[in-house]
Amino acid sequence: QVQLVESGGGLVQPGNSLRLSCADSGNTFSGAQLAWFRQAPGNEREFVAVIQWSDRGGTFAYYADSVKGRFAISRDSAKNTFYLQMNNLKPEDTAIYYCAGSPQWDTSYFIPGLYNYWGQGTQVTVSS
C-alpha cells in the first residue's frame, strides 16, 4: 500500500515560518507529480504548490498566486520525502494542508481529482 504522511504543522505567529514534510511511508511511490493543497473551514480545497518531473529529466515547480514568493516546494529523493517551506506566514494561510501525488503529471495540476494518493492532512494555524 502507498501512504503519504504529512508532518510539521502547528501554531505560529504571522511572519514566522514552518516547514511541512510529506513522507511515503511505504517507500513504494515515486510520483511524477507531487503537490500541496490546503482547505480552510467552509472553503474548497485549494491548490498551493506542485513539483513535477518530466521524462527528459527536467524539474518544474508551480505555485498559487497567493503563495508565490513565500512558499517553496522541494523533494529529497533519498529520503522519499517532499517539503513545503512556508515563509512570512499570514493568517489567511490557516488551513489543513494535504500532500498529494500522482504517477502522471499534467498541466492541470491544480485540480484535486487528478491525484491518486493523499496524506491525512496537517493543521497550520497562523494567529497572533
Image (tube, grey):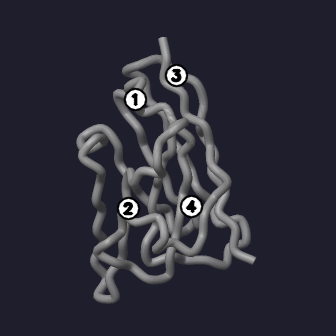
Q: Earlier in the sequence, mark 2 or mark 1?
A: 2
Q: Earlier in the sequence, mark 2 or mark 4?
A: 2
Residue 81 is marked as 4
Lateral position of residue 88 relative to residue 13, left or right: left
Q: Secondary structure at mark 2?
A: strand
Q: Earlier in the sequence, mark 1 or mark 4?
A: 4
Q: Earlier in the sequence, mark 3 or mark 2?
A: 3
Marks 1 and 3 in Cβ contact (< 8 Å) = no
Marks 3 and 2 sit apart, C-alpha to C-alpha, by 24 Å
Compared with 7, 4 (above or below) is below
Which residue is the site of mark 2?
A: 50
Residue 12 is marked as 3
Marks 1 and 4 sit apart, C-alpha to C-alpha, by 26 Å
Crowding at dot 4, Cα within 10 Å, few <14 / some 14-19 / many 20+, comes out as some
Lateral position of residue 31 relative to residue 16, left or right: right
The disc labelled 2 sits on which kind of residue? Val
Q: Secondary structure at mark 3?
A: strand
Marks 2 and 4 in Cβ contact (< 8 Å) = no
The disc labelled 4 sits on which kind of residue? Thr
Mark toward the viewer: 1 or 4 = 1
Q: Earlier in the sequence, mark 1 or mark 3?
A: 3
The disc labelled 3 sits on which kind of residue? Val
Marks 4 and 3 sit apart, C-alpha to C-alpha, by 23 Å
Lateral position of residue 21 relative to residue 108, left or right: right
Q: Residue at x 71, y 65 (%)?
A: 25
The disc labelled 1 sits on which kind of residue? Glu
